[in-house]
Amino acid sequence: MHQRSESNYSNNYSLLDMYKEDSEDEQNTLNTSKLDSINQQTTKEILNGDFDRYGFKKVSVHSSITNETYNDWFKEYAEFLKERKTKWVMLLKSNGLQVDSEKTIPSRFPPKSDKVKKLIRKGIPGEWRGSAWFFYAGGYEKLNKHVGVYDKIVRDTKNLQNKDTDVIERDLNRTFPDNIYFNGSLRSNQDGTPGKQKPQSQEEEKNSSPMIRSLRRVLVAFAHYQPQIGYCQSLNFLAGLLLLFMSEERSFWLLVILTERIIPKVHSKNLEGVHTDQGVLMLCIKEYIPSLWSILGKTFEGEVLSEDKILTKLPPVTLVTSSWFMSVFVGVLPIESVLRIWDILWYEGSKTIFRFALTLCKTCLESEEFQNAKPRKKNTELEQVELFQFMQSFPKTLINPNVLVDNCFKKIGGYGYGSISQDEINKCREFVAKQRQKLKNKSNSVINPEMNAQERRLLTGDDDIHDVYGFNRSIMSGVAWNNNISNKMKKRFSRKASKSSLV
């Protein structure tokens, strides 16, 4: 087990000594190119191209958003971005923090206040995100207490081979395959349009992208530093998104902060944090969205789940919502919406995930598409299945983050979940965890919070989970942590067509 005492890391090591193939110029070029892409791309260039300002394809195969839909939205959103940047510059200057040029990225930000919180909810400038996230999440405190630790771990794990590193290798090139920084086959031709290079061997592909090499080091170091977690699927997407906005070392420490403080135990080997947070979310839905609970809060046999049974028989919808927590909405929402949530998350804490999870649930329930598609009979099993399917796909169409954020925080014209406090979430987590522990300790408990071998293989990537539920969904759109529910949902979907004809 890796020891974390500071005395073990008294020396500073350079990554350049360990990875000669990654020159200082290459690392600096990578970081600069990402930020320049975010900062310098004009609205016209984005509208005429196939990629957004973060290097992602504007149109995903997993979304119904078209290029025309994206461009119509971005034309207006680009003006919002300019106005927001101006307000941020004014805020920094009013706090004695000078921004000398358009390319300046602040390392310090104003202390927390209602004014800062309001502006963060409107979004942090894209090229400032990494620095602001690190500042408000307490990254500097973490880094200062562990000087040289990351470099030391990278050196110690350079040639490490174990089960975690094997799974990491398989997941590396599954990470953001639609992003030019992660996918070596996406590059710009001389005319600036995306192109494909000739097919590469597996070894060439593995080492083709500096970002992939950075991701490998961060994930291996994290698995070594956090042995109680090791490597769990979805960590690659969390680390990958961080790497788009900051250095390896900072990405590593924010991943540690995320898994230790914001979503504790969610990625632990038995995924107890997932069970706990899903229990909390279901209790919140029961309290804040009773109309939704009337559909979701039932077993397949029609039994209404009471509060005590919520913890023993999590509703089938948790097969969808669990991935919201494990990936913190990466792959669930369009990237701009994900980033706006992350802006708030690093500033306000884990209550942010629950607030937006409730907002998504309410948005799905009240959407015109779902209301028009609902079966005529209410509270039927078919209605539950219809909503289950809809909650998988609909969030990917929510391209405008302003609407999502407004619905979450506005008390008038919105859903008002901004009133849910961190203290409320913490107490609810404590209650659910204690209740689950009591049930676990009973020999006749009807639940088993420990995963079996098959479930763990599915989550860690030992088996292909692209189609684990039979829904032809992408790898990050669900989590295989409850096979019992999963198998039941498969059966319901197989019978859906025949049931629909009878309604």
Image (cartoon, rainbow, N blue to C red):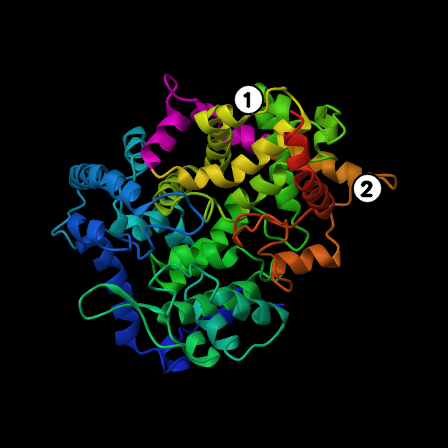
Point out which mark residue 289 bears.
1
For disc 2, the neighbor class at 10 Å (few under 14, some 14 to 19, many from 20) is few
Quadrant (top left, top right, bottom left, bottom right) of the N terminus: bottom right
The answer, for residue 386, to whether it is visible in the render is yes
Q: Where is residue 147 in the image (x, y as percent from the top left)?
A: 41, 64
Q: Nearer the viewer, residue 326 or 418?
A: 326
Specify the principal SS of the magenta part.
helix
Going by the picture, which residue comes out furthest to the right? 444
Q: In the structure shown, which secondary structural element does the residue marked by tag 1 occupy?
A: loop
The part of the chain drawn in magenta is 400-427
Instruction: Give the spatial CA distance, label 1 vs label 2.
Output: 32 Å
Q: In the structure shown, which secondary structural element does the residue marked by tag 2 occupy?
A: helix
Q: Does the magenta stretch include residue 403?
A: yes
Going by the picture, which residue comes out furthest to the front? 501
Q: Position of residue 483 (x, y in %)?
A: 71, 48
Looking at numbered disc 2 in the image, what kind of residue is underneath it? Asn
Q: Does the magenta stretch include residue 278?
A: no
Residue at 42% from the left image edge and 71% from the top image edge = 213
